[in-house]
Image (cartoon, rainbow, N blue to C red):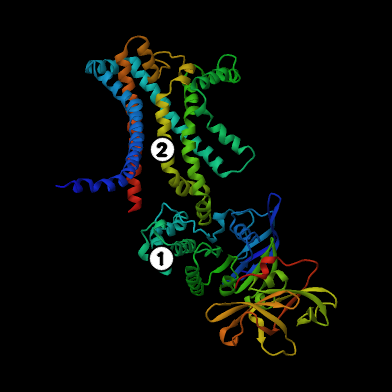
Amino acid sequence: MSASHVSAPAPSEAVRSPRLSETASRRLVHGGLTATALLYVGLLVVAPLIGIAVAAAKPGWSTWSATFADPDARHAYLVTGVITLETIVVTAVLGVVVALVLARDRFAGRSLVSAVVNLPLAVSPVIVGLAAVLLFGRGGWFEPWFTAHGIQVIFALPSMVLVTVFICIPFVIREVAPLLEELGTEEEEAARTLGASPFQTFLRVTLPNIRWGLLYGVALSTARALGEVGAVLIVSGTIAGHTETATLYVLRAFDESKDASGYVVAVTLALVSILLLAGIEIFKRKEEKVLST
Amino acid sequence: MSRGIVIENLTKSFGSFLAVDDVTFEAQEGKITALLGPSGSGKSTVLRTIAGLERANAGRIWVDGEEQGGKSPQERRLGFVFQHYALFRHMTVQQNVTFGLAVRKAPKPERRKRVSELLDLVGLAYFADRYPDQLSGGQRQRVALARALAPRPKVLLLDEPFGALDARVRQELRRWLDDLHRELGVTSLLVTHDQEEALELANQVVVMRQGKVEQIGTPEQIYNQPATPFVAGFVGASNVLRGVVWEGHVHFGRAAVAGAHHLDDGLRAHAFIRPHDIELTRAPGDLSFPVTVERRTNLGWMSKLHLRLEDGQMLTAELPNEEIMGIGPGDHVHANLRNAKVFSRNGQDPQPDQELAAV
């Protein structure tokens, strides 16, 4: 053990240390970013979900069975179910039609339509609800016609479905339109020259190519439909046991200090949405694996 | 009535752009006809209109004696092969080839028989269960061809079928298509911008330019007797020399070339000369004139020689290396030009890219 032994590594360490600190700082930045992202997801997404789940579980099974036995809660689930199913059908069909037009047709004002399609994402649902009231409510533009034909729009299912579709349809269009653009028209033209009718072409060539985008868009739109409050709150009139949806039931539960029931319904809604999105994701992975082998 | 494809006064415009302008020609039954022209000449539009993928503004189309006007693509029963294959990416090779039979509700045993027959024909039976993205470009185009042929179309329309492939595969597939056509004898219309492809494959060539037909003829006629300066410049490489007609010759400076007997004296003219129609000698001859060698590019068995005439115009000659006799840059030699095609200039210069059109 001599002094030279100890001092020998010193110069090389002096050379290495700035590089070490450089990689270290890079690691620090990288780790910091990852931590921030995880913190964000944990704090703002996962934690509230767990919080609601815990809050719903705390009062015990009796609250669950009581909530599910409550006719208002049952009816609220039914209303949400009906609205969601109708929204799924309408957004899927209309969404694909609009996406086809946007991706394929070249007409004056196309970019305007393209921008307007996204508008529901930018406008507050409350405003959407107000707009529907202005159109279909007392003194609204279309109210006389519907009243004359005996159709109740406002404070009834039609307006609730209408605003939900309006809010949800961009999810489908935004998923499908880029796929159609990317697909181009050549495969469809090939199908036509091979003897396929326009409908056969859509069914056998176009639809299989957009099916994942369509499913994903519909899943997002379903999740959104399940959770919609603002617009539905305004157009429905929140009549318990009549036009009250599951989310509106949650709102009322808190108003009336029946927090536990509110948590139960909230958890079931969140669960359905999560399962839906996770299911699509798993399905898609499986399909891709099959295709790539 | 012809059993091939007859096009009469076909006109098609996109907005204010006239893509096809009063085109008339016939593709004979059982033969390959090539529609040859630069991009934007309207040849693909003609093909797409025949298939019903575009609607003509005017004109008539007959296929196998039947008028096609007003028919939808699926009613026409024509085979179409796209430049970028247009295979159904979510279907296997076999499903792709079956498609045309399936949508026409052909009986299942017949489908299976026909599909395996075609996969054997294009040599892809082994790949029947692959997806298009697992195949090479050449294989994909063969699948596309099998798919187009499966429903036994009356004619085969090929839109730049080799355009997306690299040079070697293109050569290979061209020869393969030639063999296939000999075997099947299906009336074919081939759109291409590649003059070599047209000359090699086609029995008849229709040269198009700016939506109009420039010339119709056999490959030999198109190459050896170009009807217009455009055809002379577009089909095969050509040098263009500008000069003035005098007593059947085009004169430029002290040099002259024969072949202008059809033009009046004093007219300004263009003489088109193929690079291989130039002969070089050390000693002056009767019809030859002096040139200076500026550059020589050796391409193995032959060389490209860049020659400057006395009046400053340039010529590119291509000569087998054994005929060059050591001629190199800086040498003063004598050039003798054969088979010049002379066209009156009409105050128009040929497009610059024609002069350097590569072989």
* Foreground: disc 1 or disc 2: 2
Amino acid type, callout 2 = Tyr
Compared to B220, does B101 lie above or below?
above
> Looking at this rendering, what residue extends furthest in the left direction?
A1
Place residue A269 in its image quadrant.
top left
Assign a secondary structure to mark 1.
Answer: helix
- Residue, disc 2: A216
Categorize mark 1 by other alpha carbons within 10 Å: few (<14), some (14-19), many (20+): many
Compared to A42, does B88 lie above or below?
below
Amino acid type, callout 1 = Leu
Instruction: Give me the residue at 52% from left, 20% from top.
Output: A127
Where does residue B7 sit, x and y in percent of width and height?
66, 63
Label 1, label 2: how far apart the Cα atoms are? 36 Å
Instruction: Give me the residue at 49% from left, 47% from top.
Output: A182
Marker disc for residue B319 = none
- Residue, disc 1: B119
> Looking at this rendering, what residue extends furthest in the top direction?
A256
Where does residue B214 sit, x and y in percent of width and height?
70, 68
Categorize mark 2 by other alpha carbons within 10 Å: few (<14), some (14-19), many (20+): many
Assign a secondary structure to mark 2.
Answer: helix
Question: Disc 2: which chain?
Answer: A
Place residue B252 in its image quadrant.
bottom right
**Foreground pick, B295 / A108:** B295
Instruction: Give me the residue at 43% from left, 14% from top.
Output: A238
Residue B106 appears in the rendering? no
Where does residue A72 sit, x and y in percent of width and height?
35, 15
